[in-house]
Image (cartoon, rainbow, N blue to C red):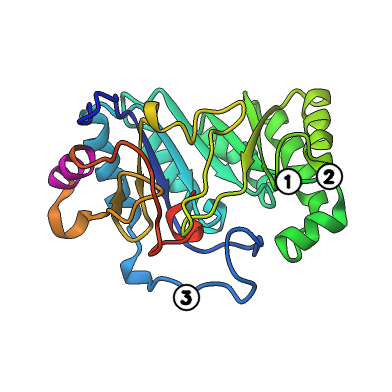
Amino acid sequence: MFDSYNRRINYLRISVTDRCNLRCTYCMPEEGVALLKHKDILSFEEIKEIVQVAVSYGIDKIRLTGGEPLVRKGILDLVKMISTIKGIKDFGMTTNGIFLEKMAMDLKSAGLHRINISLDTLDPEKYSSISRGGDIEAVFKGIEAAKKSGFSPIKINCVVQNSSSDQDAKEVKSFCENNGLQIRFIKLMNLEKGIFSIVEHGEGGNCTSCNRLRLTANGMIKPCLFSELEYNIRRLGIEKTFELAVGNKPACGTTNKTNQFSNIGG
Protein backbone atom coordinates (compact mmCIF):
# COMPACT_ATOMS: atom_id res chain seq x y z
CA MET A 1 0.00 0.00 0.00
CA PHE A 2 1.15 3.51 -0.83
CA ASP A 3 -0.43 6.65 0.56
CA SER A 4 -0.99 9.88 -1.34
CA TYR A 5 2.56 11.00 -0.50
CA ASN A 6 4.07 7.83 -2.02
CA ARG A 7 5.02 6.38 1.36
CA ARG A 8 4.85 2.59 1.46
CA ILE A 9 2.60 1.58 4.37
CA ASN A 10 3.75 -1.79 5.67
CA TYR A 11 3.62 -1.47 9.48
CA LEU A 12 0.60 -2.03 11.75
CA ARG A 13 0.76 -1.34 15.48
CA ILE A 14 -1.99 -3.12 17.41
CA SER A 15 -3.12 -2.00 20.86
CA VAL A 16 -4.53 -5.18 22.38
CA THR A 17 -5.70 -3.55 25.61
CA ASP A 18 -6.08 -0.15 27.23
CA ARG A 19 -5.16 -1.62 30.62
CA CYS A 20 -1.75 -1.43 32.27
CA ASN A 21 -0.18 -2.58 35.53
CA LEU A 22 1.78 0.70 35.80
CA ARG A 23 0.75 4.36 35.85
CA CYS A 24 3.71 6.07 34.18
CA THR A 25 3.56 9.82 34.60
CA TYR A 26 3.87 10.60 30.89
CA CYS A 27 1.27 8.03 29.83
CA MET A 28 -1.70 8.36 32.15
CA PRO A 29 -2.95 10.23 35.22
CA GLU A 30 -2.31 8.78 38.67
CA GLU A 31 -5.96 7.75 39.08
CA GLY A 32 -5.82 5.87 35.78
CA VAL A 33 -8.20 6.32 32.86
CA ALA A 34 -11.78 5.33 32.10
CA LEU A 35 -11.43 1.77 30.83
CA LEU A 36 -13.15 0.33 27.79
CA LYS A 37 -16.02 -2.07 28.29
CA HIS A 38 -15.16 -5.69 27.53
CA LYS A 39 -17.63 -5.82 24.63
CA ASP A 40 -15.91 -2.87 22.97
CA ILE A 41 -12.47 -4.49 22.90
CA LEU A 42 -11.57 -6.42 19.77
CA SER A 43 -11.57 -10.19 20.16
CA PHE A 44 -8.55 -12.24 19.16
CA GLU A 45 -10.51 -13.60 16.21
CA GLU A 46 -11.25 -10.06 15.01
CA ILE A 47 -7.61 -9.05 15.37
CA LYS A 48 -6.45 -12.10 13.42
CA GLU A 49 -8.87 -11.34 10.58
CA ILE A 50 -7.72 -7.72 10.49
CA VAL A 51 -4.08 -8.79 10.33
CA GLN A 52 -4.83 -11.26 7.54
CA VAL A 53 -6.42 -8.52 5.44
CA ALA A 54 -3.62 -6.10 6.32
CA VAL A 55 -0.99 -8.59 5.14
CA SER A 56 -2.88 -9.07 1.88
CA TYR A 57 -2.58 -5.29 1.40
CA GLY A 58 1.17 -5.31 1.95
CA ILE A 59 1.58 -5.04 5.73
CA ASP A 60 4.54 -7.20 6.76
CA LYS A 61 5.45 -5.69 10.13
CA ILE A 62 3.23 -6.16 13.19
CA ARG A 63 3.76 -4.84 16.71
CA LEU A 64 1.58 -5.57 19.73
CA THR A 65 1.22 -2.77 22.26
CA GLY A 66 -1.19 -1.67 25.00
CA GLY A 67 -1.62 -0.31 27.59
CA GLU A 68 0.54 -3.23 28.60
CA PRO A 69 -0.04 -6.14 26.18
CA LEU A 70 0.99 -8.79 28.70
CA VAL A 71 -1.95 -7.99 30.98
CA ARG A 72 -4.40 -9.11 28.28
CA LYS A 73 -5.75 -12.52 29.26
CA GLY A 74 -4.72 -15.19 26.76
CA ILE A 75 -2.16 -12.99 25.00
CA LEU A 76 -0.08 -16.06 24.15
CA ASP A 77 -3.00 -17.41 22.14
CA LEU A 78 -3.11 -14.19 20.10
CA VAL A 79 0.63 -14.35 19.46
CA LYS A 80 0.23 -17.92 18.19
CA MET A 81 -2.68 -16.92 15.94
CA ILE A 82 -0.78 -14.03 14.37
CA SER A 83 2.46 -15.98 14.00
CA THR A 84 0.73 -18.47 11.68
CA ILE A 85 -0.17 -15.76 9.15
CA LYS A 86 2.12 -16.01 6.15
CA GLY A 87 3.75 -12.81 4.94
CA ILE A 88 4.69 -11.29 8.29
CA LYS A 89 8.42 -10.58 8.30
CA ASP A 90 8.69 -8.69 11.60
CA PHE A 91 6.48 -9.55 14.59
CA GLY A 92 7.27 -7.64 17.77
CA MET A 93 5.87 -6.42 21.06
CA THR A 94 6.44 -3.37 23.24
CA THR A 95 6.20 -4.11 26.96
CA ASN A 96 7.19 -2.59 30.28
CA GLY A 97 8.92 -5.90 31.03
CA ILE A 98 7.37 -6.54 34.43
CA PHE A 99 5.86 -9.90 33.41
CA LEU A 100 8.61 -11.01 31.03
CA GLU A 101 10.45 -13.17 33.55
CA LYS A 102 7.51 -15.58 33.52
CA MET A 103 6.37 -15.12 29.92
CA ALA A 104 9.43 -14.54 27.72
CA MET A 105 10.06 -18.18 26.85
CA ASP A 106 6.39 -18.83 26.08
CA LEU A 107 6.20 -15.71 23.90
CA LYS A 108 9.20 -16.88 21.92
CA SER A 109 7.75 -20.36 21.55
CA ALA A 110 4.44 -18.86 20.43
CA GLY A 111 6.16 -17.18 17.49
CA LEU A 112 7.01 -13.64 18.59
CA HIS A 113 10.16 -12.39 16.84
CA ARG A 114 11.40 -9.61 19.06
CA ILE A 115 10.79 -7.42 22.09
CA ASN A 116 11.02 -3.71 22.93
CA ILE A 117 11.22 -2.99 26.67
CA SER A 118 10.60 0.38 28.31
CA LEU A 119 13.31 1.59 30.70
CA ASP A 120 13.84 5.28 31.44
CA THR A 121 16.30 5.10 34.35
CA LEU A 122 18.47 2.64 36.28
CA ASP A 123 17.63 4.24 39.61
CA PRO A 124 15.07 2.11 41.52
CA GLU A 125 13.53 5.09 43.31
CA LYS A 126 13.25 7.16 40.14
CA TYR A 127 11.77 4.19 38.30
CA SER A 128 9.21 3.70 41.04
CA SER A 129 8.36 7.40 40.92
CA ILE A 130 8.04 7.55 37.12
CA SER A 131 5.96 4.36 36.95
CA ARG A 132 4.10 5.08 40.19
CA GLY A 133 5.07 1.94 42.03
CA GLY A 134 6.88 -0.24 39.50
CA ASP A 135 9.69 -2.59 40.58
CA ILE A 136 12.77 -2.08 38.43
CA GLU A 137 14.21 -5.43 39.53
CA ALA A 138 11.30 -7.14 37.76
CA VAL A 139 12.29 -5.31 34.57
CA PHE A 140 15.92 -6.41 34.89
CA LYS A 141 14.78 -10.02 35.40
CA GLY A 142 12.49 -9.66 32.40
CA ILE A 143 15.36 -8.46 30.22
CA GLU A 144 17.48 -11.43 31.26
CA ALA A 145 14.61 -13.80 30.55
CA ALA A 146 14.16 -12.28 27.10
CA LYS A 147 17.87 -12.76 26.36
CA LYS A 148 17.81 -16.38 27.55
CA SER A 149 14.73 -17.02 25.43
CA GLY A 150 16.62 -16.04 22.29
CA PHE A 151 14.97 -12.74 21.43
CA SER A 152 17.25 -10.67 19.20
CA PRO A 153 17.54 -7.81 18.92
CA ILE A 154 16.14 -6.66 22.25
CA LYS A 155 15.51 -2.93 22.10
CA ILE A 156 15.22 -0.64 25.09
CA ASN A 157 12.85 2.32 24.78
CA CYS A 158 14.12 5.17 26.94
CA VAL A 159 11.91 8.25 27.27
CA VAL A 160 14.02 11.35 27.89
CA GLN A 161 12.95 14.71 29.27
CA ASN A 162 15.46 16.72 27.24
CA SER A 163 17.92 14.62 25.25
CA SER A 164 20.09 11.51 25.27
CA SER A 165 22.63 13.61 27.17
CA ASP A 166 20.44 13.46 30.29
CA GLN A 167 22.22 11.57 33.06
CA ASP A 168 19.58 8.85 33.31
CA ALA A 169 19.70 8.37 29.54
CA LYS A 170 23.48 8.01 29.55
CA GLU A 171 23.27 5.40 32.31
CA VAL A 172 20.63 3.42 30.42
CA LYS A 173 22.79 3.58 27.28
CA SER A 174 25.79 2.22 29.19
CA PHE A 175 23.62 -0.57 30.59
CA CYS A 176 22.53 -1.49 27.07
CA GLU A 177 26.07 -1.49 25.71
CA ASN A 178 27.19 -3.78 28.52
CA ASN A 179 24.29 -6.20 28.06
CA GLY A 180 23.98 -6.57 24.30
CA LEU A 181 20.85 -4.44 24.04
CA GLN A 182 19.90 -1.77 21.50
CA ILE A 183 18.89 1.65 22.80
CA ARG A 184 16.20 3.96 21.40
CA PHE A 185 15.78 7.43 22.88
CA ILE A 186 12.27 8.85 22.68
CA LYS A 187 11.86 12.48 23.61
CA LEU A 188 8.88 13.18 25.83
CA MET A 189 5.85 13.78 23.59
CA ASN A 190 2.61 15.69 24.06
CA LEU A 191 -0.37 14.77 21.91
CA GLU A 192 -2.46 17.83 22.73
CA LYS A 193 0.35 20.29 22.04
CA GLY A 194 1.72 18.40 19.05
CA ILE A 195 5.18 17.94 20.54
CA PHE A 196 7.12 15.07 18.97
CA SER A 197 10.48 14.42 17.38
CA ILE A 198 12.42 11.73 15.54
CA VAL A 199 13.32 8.76 17.71
CA GLU A 200 17.08 8.59 18.21
CA HIS A 201 18.37 5.23 16.89
CA GLY A 202 14.84 4.46 15.69
CA GLU A 203 12.43 5.23 12.87
CA GLY A 204 9.47 6.80 14.66
CA GLY A 205 8.69 10.50 14.47
CA ASN A 206 9.96 11.03 10.92
CA CYS A 207 6.83 12.04 9.05
CA THR A 208 8.48 12.01 5.63
CA SER A 209 9.05 8.25 5.82
CA CYS A 210 6.21 7.19 8.14
CA ASN A 211 5.09 3.70 7.17
CA ARG A 212 2.59 2.88 9.93
CA LEU A 213 -1.03 2.60 10.84
CA ARG A 214 -2.41 2.03 14.33
CA LEU A 215 -5.25 -0.22 15.44
CA THR A 216 -6.73 0.70 18.82
CA ALA A 217 -8.10 -1.86 21.26
CA ASN A 218 -11.68 -0.88 20.38
CA GLY A 219 -11.23 -1.20 16.63
CA MET A 220 -10.25 2.21 15.35
CA ILE A 221 -7.64 2.46 12.61
CA LYS A 222 -5.59 5.63 13.04
CA PRO A 223 -3.39 6.80 10.16
CA CYS A 224 -1.32 9.08 12.40
CA LEU A 225 -0.57 9.25 16.12
CA PHE A 226 -0.68 13.05 16.08
CA SER A 227 -4.02 13.33 14.31
CA GLU A 228 -7.62 12.90 15.42
CA LEU A 229 -8.47 10.97 12.25
CA GLU A 230 -9.73 7.46 12.97
CA TYR A 231 -11.93 4.94 11.20
CA ASN A 232 -14.20 2.38 12.88
CA ILE A 233 -13.31 -1.03 11.54
CA ARG A 234 -16.45 -2.70 12.90
CA ARG A 235 -18.75 -0.14 11.28
CA LEU A 236 -16.94 0.34 7.97
CA GLY A 237 -15.48 -3.12 7.42
CA ILE A 238 -11.80 -4.02 7.27
CA GLU A 239 -11.10 -3.28 3.62
CA LYS A 240 -12.88 0.08 3.55
CA THR A 241 -11.21 1.14 6.79
CA PHE A 242 -7.73 0.46 5.45
CA GLU A 243 -8.52 2.28 2.21
CA LEU A 244 -9.71 5.36 4.10
CA ALA A 245 -6.84 5.33 6.59
CA VAL A 246 -4.17 5.01 3.92
CA GLY A 247 -5.87 7.40 1.52
CA ASN A 248 -6.26 10.11 4.17
CA LYS A 249 -2.96 9.65 5.98
CA PRO A 250 -1.68 13.21 6.55
CA ALA A 251 1.69 14.44 5.35
CA CYS A 252 2.71 15.22 8.90
CA GLY A 253 1.34 14.98 12.42
CA THR A 254 -0.18 18.02 14.10
CA THR A 255 -2.14 17.57 17.34
CA ASN A 256 -4.43 14.99 18.90
CA LYS A 257 -6.75 16.26 21.62
CA THR A 258 -9.14 13.31 21.69
CA ASN A 259 -6.80 10.39 22.43
CA GLN A 260 -4.22 9.39 25.03
CA PHE A 261 -1.10 7.25 24.70
CA SER A 262 -2.74 4.65 26.93
CA ASN A 263 -5.54 3.98 24.43
CA ILE A 264 -3.57 4.31 21.19
CA GLY A 265 -0.51 2.28 22.06
CA GLY A 266 2.09 4.98 21.41
Q: Residues within 10 Å of mark 3 (few under 14, many from 20)?
A: few
Type of the residue with mark 2? Leu
* Element under disc 1: loop
Residue ID for mark 3: 34
Label pair 2/3, CB-CB below 8 angstroms: no
At 56% from the left edge and 58% from the top edge, which residue is drawn?
A: 71
Element marked by disc 3: loop
Answer above or below: position of 199 versus 23.
above
Q: In this picture, which residue range is highlighted in magenta?
A: 239-246
Give the amino acid type for the residue marked by disc 3 in the picture: Ala
Q: Give the residue drawn at x 79%, y 43%.
A: 140
Residue at the spot of label 2 = 122
Observer-nearest of 92 and 193:
193
Foreground mark, 1 or 3, reads 1
- How far apart are the alpha carbons under marks 1 and 3? 26 Å
Q: Earlier in the sequence, mark 2 or mark 3?
A: 3
76, 261: nearer the viewer: 261
Disc number for residue 16: none
**Residue 78, how many percent across, how many down?**
42, 46
Which residue carries the number 1 mark?
120
Question: Hey, what amino acid is under mark 1?
Answer: Asp
Quadrant that contains the N terminus: top left
Quick one: 148 or 137, which is closer to the camera?
Answer: 137
* 146 up-or-down from 129: above or below: above
Quadrant assignment, res 183: top right
